Structure formats: structure tokens, C-alpha cells
Image (cartoon, grey):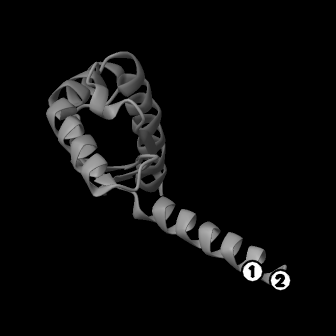
């Protein structure tokens, strides 16, 4: 149980810190509009998958953002090492949060449905 609590707390800390690092330390314009939406930490605390969302739906924008995040990974991991009170900083990997995209798609379908109901 204590391990589960620690993983959850670490996920929240990583999410908060990575948002802050992106805002204050990463100067790459490709990652300006990135929002960290969640973090999945492995049970052994060795790996963290960091989910992000961006405002654009364009594949080209997603590729640029992913490239910017990949380039900044070492800097971000180094910053996390200084900020988090853990023995070993997990390896981090960025992945686009598809659930946000899916939610936006559902909202759009609902808007279309409601507007077609009026006629």
C-alpha cells in the first residue's frame, strides 16, 4: 500500500514539476503550448511516461512538439533530479495524450448534433 501511495504522489510531483520546467527552463518554441495531462510511473519507479496535450490537431504540429520534447528530455530529467527527493530519477518518455483529443472529438460531434437538431 505504501508503494502505491508513493507512485501516485511521485506521478503528481513529476506532473507539476515538468509543467513548471517547460514553462520556466525550456526555451524551445516547439514546446510552448504543451500541457502535461498525466504521468504514469512504473511500480519500480524506474520509468515515467509523461502524457501531454497540444491545442493543434495537425500531425505536423504534433511531430514538432514531440521533437522538441525529445530534445529537452535530458534537461527535464536533470531538473527533476534536482527537484525531487528520490534516490533515482526515473527514465522519462513523452507521449501525446490521445484521451484529450478523443474528448474534443466527442464535444465536436455533440455540437454538430445539437446544431442539426434546430432545423
Quadrant in the rendering for residue 31: top left
Quadrant in the rendering for residue 78: top left
| Disc 2 + disc 1, Cβ < 8 Å | yes
- Residue 73 horizontal/vertical position (percent): 19, 34
**Which quadrant holds the C terminus?**
bottom right
Residue located beneath label 1 in the image: 116
Q: CA distance from mark 2 to mark 1?
A: 6 Å
Quadrant in the rendering for residue 103: bottom right
Q: Would you say residue 90 is visible in this rendering?
A: no
User: Position of 112 compared to 90: left or right?
Assistant: right
- Residue 100 horizontal/vertical position (percent): 50, 59
| Residue depicted at x 42% and y 46% | 54
- Residue 109 horizontal/vertical position (percent): 61, 75
Q: Residues within 10 Å of mark 2 (few under 14, many from 20)?
A: few
| Residue depicted at x 27% and y 22% | 79
42 or 16, which is in the foreground?
Answer: 16
User: Position of 117 compared to 16: left or right?
Assistant: right
Establish if 43 lies above or below 27.
below
| Residue depicted at x 56% and y 63% | 104
Residue located beneath label 2 in the image: 119
Amino acid at each position: 500500500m505504501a508503494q502505491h501511495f508513493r507512485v501516485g504522489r511521485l506521478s503528481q510531483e513529476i506532473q507539476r514539476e515538468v509543467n513548471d520546467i517547460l514553462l520556466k527552463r525550456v526555451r524551445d518554441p516547439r514546446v510552448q503550448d504543451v500541457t502535461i495531462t498525466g504521468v504514469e510511473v512504473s511500480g519500480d519507479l524506474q520509468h515515467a511516461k509523461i502524457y501531454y496535450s497540444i491545442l493543434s490537431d495537425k500531425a505536423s504540429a504534433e511531430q514538432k512538439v514531440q521533437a522538441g520534447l525529445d530534445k529537452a528530455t535530458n534537461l527535464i530529467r536533470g531538473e527533476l533530479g534536482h527537484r525531487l527527493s528520490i534516490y533515482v530519477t526515473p527514465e522519462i518518455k513523452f507521449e501525446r495524450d490521445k484521451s484529450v483529443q478523443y474528448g474534443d472529438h466527442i464535444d465536436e460531434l455533440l455540437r454538430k448534433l445539437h446544431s442539426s437538431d434546430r432545423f
